[in-house]
Image (spheres, rainbow, N blue to C red):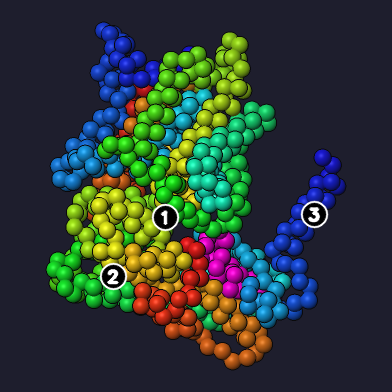
Amino acid sequence: MSRQLKVLLASAALAASTAISTGSSEAADLKVAFFASSAQNGFNQAVYKGIQTKAKELGVEVAIYDGQFDAAKQYSQIEDVLAGGKFDAFIVVPNDTVGIAGAVEQVGKAGKPLATALFPIGPDLTKLEPQVPGVTVTVASSPAAGAAVQAGTVVDYCKAIDPCNVVILIGQKIYPFDNLRYETYLKVLGGQKNIKVVATGEGNYDPDKSLTVMTDILQANKKINVVLSNADQHLVGAEIALTNAGYKVSDLFLSGGGAASIAIDAIREGRWKNTLAYYPVSMGSLALEAVVNKLKAKPGPTVIDMDKVGPLPAVIDKDVLDKHPEFKGEWAQ
Amino acid sequence: MADTSTSPLTASRRFGPGSFTPLQVFRSYAVAVMILLLMTALSLMSDSFLTTQNLINILNQNAPLAIMAAAMTLVIICGGFDLSVGAGFSVAAVSAAWIALHVSPTLGLALAPLVGLVLGVINGLIITKLRLHSFLATLATGLMFRGIAILISSGKLIAVRMPEFTWLGRDKIGPVYIAVLVMIAFAIVLMVLLNRTTLGRKILAVGGNEEAAILSGIRTSRIKILAFAITGLAAGLAAAISVSRVSMGQPTAGAGLELDAIAAVIIGGTSIYGGRGAIWRSLAGVFMLALINNGFNILNADPFFKDFTTGFIIVVAVAISAIGR
């Protein structure tokens, strides 16, 4: 292949990828880059859907960057896009809430607004107020506060049961946010004498892995009252394991997290009891609105607490859904 | 020609005086020794371990990995690697779910192995026609396959809540899960293929000394394509079981399964350099990895120690098989 042809092909490929990633609207004055923790993840896609919808409404151009669940990759992407100078504002779903701070500070120094969605950026995961220079607004809910409320529903359920045997399925304990949730669960449940956490498993946000770990846990623990998890994906697997083991899941207390559509269906059908609400589409929409307001020098908050501004309460159960029959969940899982 | 001992039966026939020293026998069955030690330890630590139900569960949970590892054995004996099986698994999984949802659940399950087969043939053709090393070629095709899975599913989960779709992953015949029976049948077919057919001998010959195999008139390219095709078929079959079990297909499914499968094959004692190995060894490797996971779950042990323990046991197993080599 001749050198000219190679250059031509490379240029065409670059031009095509630029067109795909930045969209084709030349009329838009403002451009916002969205750094997904992973573009192939349902939650991130729902956040992007919210960003796109609001961007269309405001006449803003947006592009998505795929962090591939890799903190270093996401850090580099932010640096590269900032150096490219094509974008006016940034929205990040961080892979690493602490390590990403360096890149965020560079964005701040360049005078560009940045919104962090899902998690705060900084050393303290419980604090939604911006902790590092460069964060304009945090659009998230506190992992600890949500976990405490969720565990509180377990305490209420267990009041008349002694012992009340609880299985906790957590994502991965190596993730700081999962560890924080797990410690919060233990703290809340540990204060009740009748509640016994009989086992903890890692579901890794995978129904199949959750099925395996729950099946094994049920071998060692014959009597279960509650399955408490931070992710609806885990309950999908746990439900299959419980059914295989002869449990009628509607007789148990299954509590998940995410408010995925599959969880909303399960709660409506009475199979699960509740899910900790996450509203990724609303989150994306609010994040975009916040950075655009900043660019237009309009006043705005530095914290948007999704537990307070979401369309439904922080914990969604059947009573809540009965009052909101139109609600389907903002993401598929 | 490399050592072609491929089954306990074959090996035991050679245990005549002067054929094998006790050390060699110990080395040859390192994985079996490790399994026995693990099972003894777990039985002492938990009453829940050595129960029929738990052992059935272990087999059922690991049937997809066992199918993939059994097929991967052929590729490794052939002197290659297939790093794309995890991605092939995800293509087959989302294809099965998509077809189940839009056409027919039975057709979805039936086509998943065929999807895997096609991907395996593509791998084989790329490796033999372009003369690429299988490690590099399947690393690249793995990325392509993962991209295809994302395109099919639009990156989203495809939920299939239909009873006609879940029988393969969840139903039993008597006390045994259908998935386990499928795994046993598949493993037997591969054992017969490797140990009792001309094709099996050719696979061993290609991995043992490819040049000699070519000079002997063996069409090595065809053998390699076939080995990769079987591995692809296995990934599709495993995906059908897995997607049926959780009644949903997702593009992230199967991530890391290729390394689990390769680890199981190597732990079992199949030579990483090709030319020597056995299907039963890979199944034993899968069982050993499964015991570690099961033990941690049953004992409610801190998962922080699981990776360390798994790695440590792999090192011990591989070290035993390397003693005196």
Question: How many neighbours does mark 2 have within 10 angstroms: few (below 14), some (14-19), or many (20 or more)?
Answer: many
Q: Nearer the viewer, residue B104 or B18?
A: B104
Q: Which mark is residue A206?
A: 1
Is mark 1 in CB contact (under 8 Å) with mark 3? no
- In this picture, is A158 found above or below B285? below
Q: CA distance from mark 3 to mark 2?
A: 53 Å
Q: Are dots 3 and 2 on a single chain? A: yes
Q: Which residues are magenta?
A: A31-51
Element marked by disc 1: loop
Eye-nearest disc, 1 or 2: 1
Does the image show residue B136? no
* Left-right relation of B317 to A301: left
Quadrant hosting residue B56: top left
The residue type indicated by label 2 comes to Tyr
Residue A207: horizontal and vertical position, in percent?
40, 54
Residue B295: horizontal and vertical position, in percent?
25, 46
Quadrant hosting residue A188: bottom left
Q: Is A162 included in the stretch rendered in magenta?
A: no
Read off the residue under disc 3: A12
Q: Which mark is residue B243?
A: none
The residue type indicated by label 1 comes to Asp
Q: Which mark is residue A185?
A: 2
